[in-house]
Image: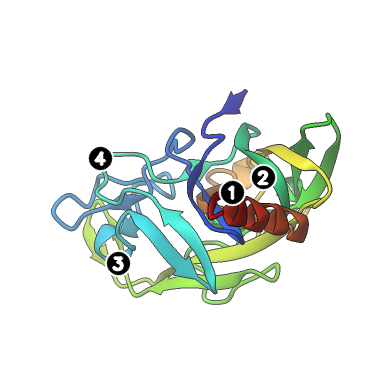
């Protein structure tokens, strides 16, 4: 099932932040006034809204993204379960993603996402995220934002949590159409051979924001169009 958005939130000659408002399906943030609003990890723990950026443009690691609402009354994470998210059409060289995993870092079953291009071709690419409450990042993830506490049904917890960023390489000669996200996976901490009764639930990969980086040909086309309007 393909989900919205298929449009950009903001764009320059070099990048375009993806509008994920139509794809958010999880309440991953809560306020201190109502700490039970969110359920990022399932049992009711979530990111603290006062530690997240306000809605709108935000920069992590030199990349500008569109931050979602944080008040807990609107969904603000895309929980991956095999769905396709339609992307703004265009030629791009990479897709930058901010997110995290809950219930442990994503395991071997969640290794790949599938990129679909306008010509019908596809490509499988690795997409793995570190657990939100891990002390160290994994899979080459960079730390986008470290927060000193999280919120749960019992209020504030001093356990630090993080958002991470990763990059997927795209074919700059093709027009992107969508990304199909991985399904839930066995957490990486589970010993091989154990059955499903050995852990509470599978690891969920959850996406906070995405930004597409234009390929050089696309940047040149935008530059020419801008120059033409100025004549």
Give the alpha-carbon distance from disc 4 to disc 3, as whole Å: 16 Å
Residue wearing tag 3: 51
What x and y, as percent, mark residue 58?
Answer: 41, 64
Residue wearing tag 2: 185
Residue wearing tag 4: 73
Residue contact at pointers 4 and 3, CB within 8 angstroms: no
Front-most of residues 225 and 218: 225
Which mark is in front, 4 or 2?
4
Upstream in sequence: badge 1 or badge 2? 2
User: Is 15 on the left-hand or right-hand side of 56?
Assistant: right
Give the alpha-carbon distance from disc 3 to disc 1, as whole Å: 24 Å
Which mark is in front, 3 or 1?
3
Give above or below for 113 relative to 166: above
What x and y, as percent, mark residue 223?
Answer: 64, 58
Which residue sits at x=41%, y=49%?
A: 40
Disc 2: CA contacts within 10 A as few (<14), some (14-19) or many (>=20): many
Front-most of residues 202 and 218: 218
Residue contact at pointers 3 and 1, CB within 8 angstroms: no
* Residue most extreme to the front: 231
Residue contact at pointers 1 and 2, CB within 8 angstroms: yes
Upstream in sequence: badge 4 or badge 3? 3
Count of labels in the image? 4
Front-most of residues 53 and 66: 66
- For mark 3, give the secondary structure: helix
- For mark 1, give the secondary structure: loop
Residue wearing tag 1: 203
**Which quarter of the figure has residue 126?**
bottom right
Upstream in sequence: badge 3 or badge 2? 3
Which residue sits at x=71%, y=52%?
A: 92
Disc 1: CA contacts within 10 A as few (<14), some (14-19) or many (>=20): many
């Amino acid at each position: 099932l393909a989900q919205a958005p298929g449009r950009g939130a903001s764009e320059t000659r070099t990048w375009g932040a993806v509008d994920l408002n139509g794809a958010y399906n999880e309440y991953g943030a809560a306020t201190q006034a109502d700490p039970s609003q969110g359920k990022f990890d399932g049992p009711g723990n979530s990111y603290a809204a006062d530690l997240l950026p306000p809605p709108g443009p935000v920069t992590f690691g030199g990349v500008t993204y569109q931050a979602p609402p944080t008040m807990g009354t609107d969904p603000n994470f895309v929980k991956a379960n095999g769905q396709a998210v339609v992307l703004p059409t265009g030629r791009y060289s990479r897709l930058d993603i901010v997110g995290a995993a809950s219930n442990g870092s994503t395991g071997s079953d969640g290794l790949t996402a599938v990129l679909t291009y306008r010509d019908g071709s596809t490509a499988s690419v690795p997409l793995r995220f570190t657990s939100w409450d891990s002390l160290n990042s994994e899979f080459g993830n960079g730390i986008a934002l470290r927060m000193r506490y999280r919120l749960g049904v019992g209020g504030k917890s001093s356990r630090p949590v993080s958002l991470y960023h990763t990059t997927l390489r795209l074919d700059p000669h093709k027009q992107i159409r969508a990304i199909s996200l991985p399904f839930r996976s066995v957490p990486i901490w589970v010993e091989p051979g154990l059955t499903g009764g050995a852990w509470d639930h599978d690891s969920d990969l959850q996406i906070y924001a995405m930004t597409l980086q234009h390929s050089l040909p696309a940047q040149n086309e935008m530059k020419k169009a801008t120059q033409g309007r100025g004549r």
